[in-house]
Each structure stands twice: as structure tokens, then as C-alpha cells.
Image (spheres, coloured by chain):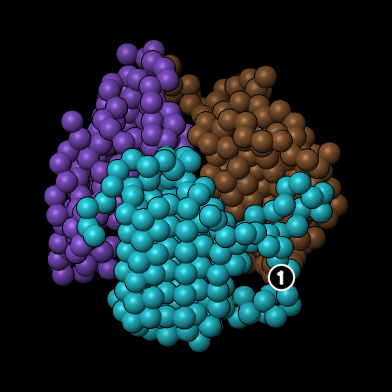
Chain colours: A brown, B purple, C cyan
Amino acid sequence: MPQPLHTVHISPRNRLGRILWGLVNALCFRYTPRTAHAWRAWVLARFGAQMGRRCHVYAGARIWAPWNLTCEDDAAIADGAEIYNLAPVHLGVHSVVSQGAFLCTATHDMHDPAFPLQAASIRVERRGWVAARAVVMPGVTVGEGAVLGLAALATHDLPPWGVYAGVPARPVGVRRSH
Amino acid sequence: MPQPLHTVHISPRNRLGRILWGLVNALCFRYTPRTAHAWRAWVLARFGAQMGRRCHVYAGARIWAPWNLTCEDDAAIADGAEIYNLAPVHLGVHSVVSQGAFLCTATHDMHDPAFPLQAASIRVERRGWVAARAVVMPGVTVGEGAVLGLAALATHDLPPWGVYAGVPARPVGVRRSH
Amino acid sequence: MPQPLHTVHISPRNRLGRILWGLVNALCFRYTPRTAHAWRAWVLARFGAQMGRRCHVYAGARIWAPWNLTCEDDAAIADGAEIYNLAPVHLGVHSVVSQGAFLCTATHDMHDPAFPLQAASIRVERRGWVAARAVVMPGVTVGEGAVLGLAALATHDLPPWGVYAGVPARPVGVRRSH
């Protein structure tokens, strides 16, 4: 089951945090050397991210709110990947989010004329892989070892160790690396 | 019915206008504070955009030609959304174009060896919503209150108050906020 | 048949080359005038690209490794197009890669716990057209005159003079410009 959506109110504290993060990103993150993974993890942790060991968050990764990010050991976020985490995003051990992928935790309640902002958390479990330009909808869990293919869209939870492709993503194979 | 395609010739005046707009964008638009919506609307209007009241065009929105943009009251264009308006783009009252969406008015005549540039206008009617990373083809109208889902592709006009998803987009639901 | 995948090792020489290319890109490529195609082709050739005559590589094109790029006469790569060429990318005479398209030569062996990087070359043959935001998988050839539509995904070789759309791309028409 996907995580439930809840209404989000962006607090003044959140806005201030993102302004600070934007500044620090521009000065100390975005233009750092490719291999400075330990440095970038340290910077993210200063903004409240829970960072495991040996995480590879590349300099071109776009993270909306570090305080809503958890990366377990050896998790990776590629250049151009976008973590739009109004709700928490949890990346498991050895999980990978590839170039230009989009983990989208937020949406709007389209049935309410006030169009309120809503969000639900996203998880990529141990050894899950969100391939390049793939998109994950709010509340979805990419199961352990599951693969979401190039440019695919995950609209529902992806069971472990399957391979999923297309818009919306359907099962297309099984991964042989238990 | 989609709007018809017409052949486009990029005039020297258009090229000059885009060079100036590129400069002004870099100096007075792209790096403005998040909440400076009135300022950005004023800048767009200086370049010929028809801007209603309380429009929210975010600083990271990419607009090809402001003089081909009409935003009615309370229309919104998010960061990273791309308005590729060789032909006019019309955004209705309270319409929303979300992050990374792409309103693509232009194509080429693939059947002509000279591969001429062609364009057709795009409309998003009142309360229409083009969700994040969705793409709208040349000539398409997103009807009143219609929703084009995350990462979907609108290849035909979208009837009012429907919800459409997939590549190409198909009806998947109805919106309850008349 | 798609080109076969082979395991890729990123050598120190490759890393150094990309650092230099990144610097030269920032200083002499990315912010050059729109019409400076001859200049940009010359810069790419200095980094090992095989460049034909009258190529149009726009300033916002993103090329991972110029030394793995061949552009025949009159080939074009638009702004925001991404040539992720860990393996060679070959663009034929009068071929076009449009805005935001992604030629992705690399993947990982998902069945190997070590998750090794793999790559296979991509070709766009004479008069082939990869339209805006379309994605081409590793090893795929876009045949002579073939068209991959807006936001489509090519998972297999595309036969000549066909038109393909969707994720994954399916035949939807025939091109009349032999």
C-alpha cells in the first residue's frame, strides 16, 4: 500500500531553511569536486539529513529539503536527480537514484477548489534502483532490489526484486541478484 | 480539435527580442527572490506578455518568448517548467503548470525534406493543471479543470474536468471540483 | 539487433579529460552566441569529436565525452539535449537530436551484485530525428529517416523511415520524405 497523503503547510521556518540551504548549496555543494562525497554528506547532515557511511550524493543532485532525507550506507543520488521531499524520502543501503530521476513526494488535492498541497513519503529500499529520468509518485515504495527502468513512472508500490518499466510502470522481469 | 500547425519563420526581430530577453532574464528574473511574483510579471509584461493579476511565475520558469504568453488572473508557472512558445500559449484563470512540465508549441514537418519549423498554439483553460514533467504537444488545449498527470503526454485536446495520465494520455478519472 | 553491452571502466585519463572538458565547456562553449556553431564544432574537435561540416551543436547541449561523439555533415544537437556517451554516439548526415532528448549509452548490470557499469553505442542514422525529451536506450540504432516522437522511449532499434511514439516506442506512422 502506498503511504497516505497528508496536507502540507509550508511554515516560515521551512522557507527560511530552504533559503539558507539554497545559499549553502550554491556556495558549498553545487560546484564541489566530483569525488567530494564525504564533504557533501557532511553539509547535508548540517541541514538535518540522516547520512550513512560512503553515500554518493553528486554535486548536481537537487534536494528540496535535506532535513527530510535519510540515506543509509552506500546510497547514491546522481547528478540531475531531483529529490522533491516535502515529505520524508528514505534511501536504503546500496540504493541508487540515477541521473534526472524525480522522487516527487508532493501533489495537490485536485478535488478541493482550494487546491491544497499534499505530500506522502517515498522509500527506496535496500538495493532498489530508480534508473535515469524515472519518476516516483507520492507515497510509493520501491521495494528491496526493485528496479524502476529508464524514464518509467512508478504509480504504485514496486514489489521486491522485480523490474518495472513504462508509464505507468508494469512488471517486465525479475532481478537475479538476491 | 487541436489547433492547426503553421510554418514558422524566425525573424531577425524575433532573434533580437530573444537575445534581449535572455539578458534581462539572467539579470532581472532568474535569480530574483521566490516571492517576487509581481516583479517578474512586470518584467514579462515589458516584453509583451499579457499578465493578469496575482500570477505566480517562478524564477526558474523558462519562457521562450514572453510576447507569445498570456496569463490570466492567478495563473502559475513553476520552477523548471518550460513554455516553448513559438506560437501563443494561453493560460487561463487559476491554471497551473507544474515543475518541469513542457508546453511545446513547435515541431517540424517531417514529411518535407526541408524539415520546416511548424507551430500551433497551446491553451490551458481555467483551473486546468499540467502536472510535473508532463508534456503538451503543439496545438493541444487542456480543457477547463482538466488534469494532465505526472509525466504524461497530451497528444489530443483534453476534455474539461477529466483526469488524464500516461504516454499518450488517456482518461483515468474525473475531477470533482466544479 | 541492438549493439551489445560491454563493461566500462572509467580510467583516470577519462576522468582527467572530463574535468578539462568541463572547464572548457564552462569557459568556451556553454555561454557562446547562439549562432557560433563553427566555433563549438571546433572546440568539440579539439577534444576528439569527429565533426562534419555545418553541424549545429547548440550551446546548451550536454555532451559527456566529446571523444565518443561523431557528427556527420549537418547533424544537429539542440539545447538541453544530453549525449551521455560512455560508448560512442554516431549522428548521421542531417540527423537531429531535439531539446531535452537523452541518448543514454550506459546502464548497470542489475543481475551482478557488484552493479558494474555497462555501455553500448547509439547511432542516429541519416535524417533520423530524436524529438524533444525522447530517450534512447543503450545500444539502440535510430534508423535512416526514423522519427522518435516527443517524450518517447526507444527500447529497440527503430527501422528506417518509420515514426515511433510512446513508452516504450511503437510504430505509429510512416515518413513520406524518401
Query: Would you call the spot at circle 1 few (<14 residues within 10 Å), some (14-19), or many (20 or more)?
Result: few
Residue B161 point in image, percent of width and height: 32, 19
Q: Going 32% across and 13% down the picture, which residue do you hit?
A: B178
- Chain of residue at mark 1: C
Q: Is residue A8 above or below residue A86?
A: above
Question: Is C126 on the left-hand or right-hand side of A78?
Answer: left
- Tell me, yes or no, if residue A68 can be seen here: no
Q: How many marks?
A: 1
Q: Which residue is mark 1?
A: C10
- Tell me, yes or no, if residue B172 can be seen here: yes
Residue, far front:
C1
Q: Going 38% across and 34% down the picture, which residue do you hit?
A: B168
Question: Which is more toward the observer, B93 or A168?
Answer: A168
Q: Identify which amino acid the numbered label 1 is placed on.
A: Ile
Q: In the rendered image, which quarter contains the C terminus of chain C?
A: bottom left
Question: Which is more toward the observer, C134 or C162?
Answer: C162
Q: Is residue A73 above or below residue B164?
A: below
Q: Going 19% across and 64% down the picture, which residue do you hit?
A: B114
